[in-house]
Amino acid sequence: MNREMHQKVMYTIAAIWNWVLAILFLVLPRIDIGYFGISGNVVPPTFLWFDCFMGLVFAFGIGFYLVSLNPEKNRDLLLIAIFEKCWVFIIGLYYFIAGEASVWVLAVVTGDLLFGLLFAEDVLAMRKSSST
């Protein structure tokens, strides 16, 4: 698979990943907040911040889809995406270690870390190809 097709597929999958997670995490806490163990032992009094975060996850999915259309043109946006993916992993790992998130949350944020690493590799490859 050539690099252009690889990028299109990778960023489209990243978009779908974000959209699915955002929708699931918006719906599942209303069914049973304890399912993913995302809030520890105490149910939060409001989902305001959680819902805002999931809205941003969905918005990042839109961004990944736009990147899939023209990765080179949107390369600088990927720097923000790399930070976001790594930050989500760090926060998820912290809460898992603290005993306030389940292994399922750790699995999801590990998926984000993998995307972040793939994005970083892609940005480095784009920089290398543009400098030659």
Image: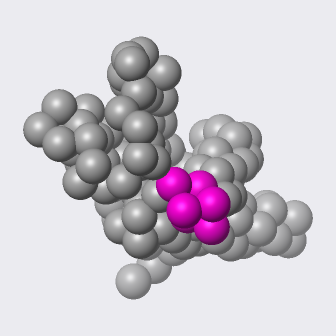
**The N terminus, quarter of image:** bottom left
Residue at x-position 41% and y-position 47%: 41
Q: Is residue 94 above or below residue 18?
A: below
| Nearest to the observer: residue 131 or residue 99 | 99
Name the residue at 64% across, 52% down: 91
Q: Position of residue 4 (x, y in %)?
A: 47, 66
Give the percent coordinates (x, y) of residue 113: 58, 66
Q: Quadrant of residue 55?
A: top left
| Residue depicted at x 59% and y 56% | 95
127 vs 114, left or right, is: right
Q: Is residue 115 above or below residue 44?
A: below
- Residue farthest bottom in this picture: 1
Give residue 81's position: percent from left, percent from top.
Answer: 62, 46
Say if residue 75 shows up in the picture. no
Kindly tell me whether residue 128 is visible in this rendering.
Answer: yes
Residue 114, percent from left and from top: 54, 72
Q: Nearer the viewer, residue 21 or 63?
A: 21
- Considering the image in quadrants, where does the C terminus appear? bottom right
Q: Is residue 125 above or below residue 76?
A: below
Q: Please say which color scheme the image uses.
A: one colour
In the displayed structure, would residue 116 be above or below residue 128? above
Report the span colored magenta: 95-100
Magenta segment includes 30 = no
**Is residue 19 shown left or right of residue 72?**
left
Q: How many marks?
A: 0
The residue most toward the left is 31
Q: Residue at x 31, y 55 (%)?
A: 36
